[in-house]
Every structure is written in C-alpha cells, then in structure tokens.
Amino acid sequence: MLQEKKVERRSPEPESAPDTGTAGSGRLRAFRRGEAMGEKMAHIFELVTEQAGLRGRLELAGKTGISLKEALAVRDSEELLAKLRVAANEILNRKA
C-alpha cells in the first residue's frame, strides 16, 4: 500500500515583497513606480532612443560619458541632467 506524502506548499511572495536587488526584477518594478534612481536621466535616454534610435542613444552616451546603465545607477543631479538635455537637444534637432 502506498503512503501519501504530505507536501508543504508555500504561497508565492506578495507584490509588496522587499527588493532583493536581483538581476533587474525589483529595479524594474521600482522604475515603474517612479522610485528608481536616475529616473529623469533614464527618461531622456528613452526619448532619444524612441526618436533617434540606437545610434542616437549611443551618441548621447558618447557625448555625455554616461551610459543608460550608469544613469539608472546614480541619483538625478541638476548637473548631469543639464549635460544630458544639451546633448539630447543637439541629437534630436539634427535628426529632425
């Protein structure tokens, strides 16, 4: 006669689980909630990518010395935002 094993089932983690910093999953949720570092800088990268494509994004990174990954890793500062805005305007005005 076979015995049934009792298996303890765990419930999935709730949505409000703390961010453990694993490979982007929590950071993406934080970005969508507007809590990510570098949110404004990342938005500038997003706009340039939408309007000028990958080449525009690479040019923005080249002109500013800031990659999208770096922009997401640091807090928005007025100095960095100004640098990104100037470069983004040059790229987008030339592409128009």
Image (spheres, grey):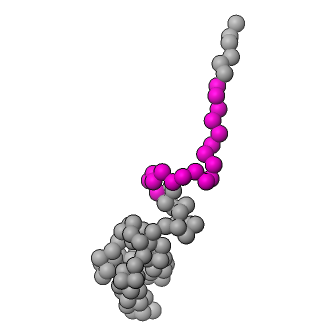
Residue 54 at x, y = what percent?
40, 75
- Residue furthest out toward the top: 1
Secondary structure mainly formed by the magenta segment: loop
Q: Is residue 20 above or below residue 77?
A: above
Residue at 51% x, 54% y: name it. Answer: 19
Q: Please check the rendered image and state whether residue 23 is part of the magenta-colored stretch, yes or no.
A: yes
Q: Which residues are magenta?
A: 7-24
Residue 63 at x, y = what percent?
30, 82
Q: Is residue 15 visible?
A: yes
Quadrant holding the C terminus:
bottom left
Q: Is residue 25 left or right of residue 95?
A: right
Residue at 38% x, 89% y: name it. Answer: 86
Residue at 53% x, 63% y: name it. Answer: 30
78 and 10: which is toward the camera? 78
Numbered label tally: 0
93 and 6: which is toward the camera? 6
Q: Is residue 46 left or right of residue 90?
A: right
18 and 26: which is toward the camera? 18
Quadrant holding the N terminus:
top right
Q: Please check the rendered image and state whether residue 16 is part of the magenta-colored stretch, yes or no.
A: yes
Residue at 55% x, 61% y: name it. Answer: 29
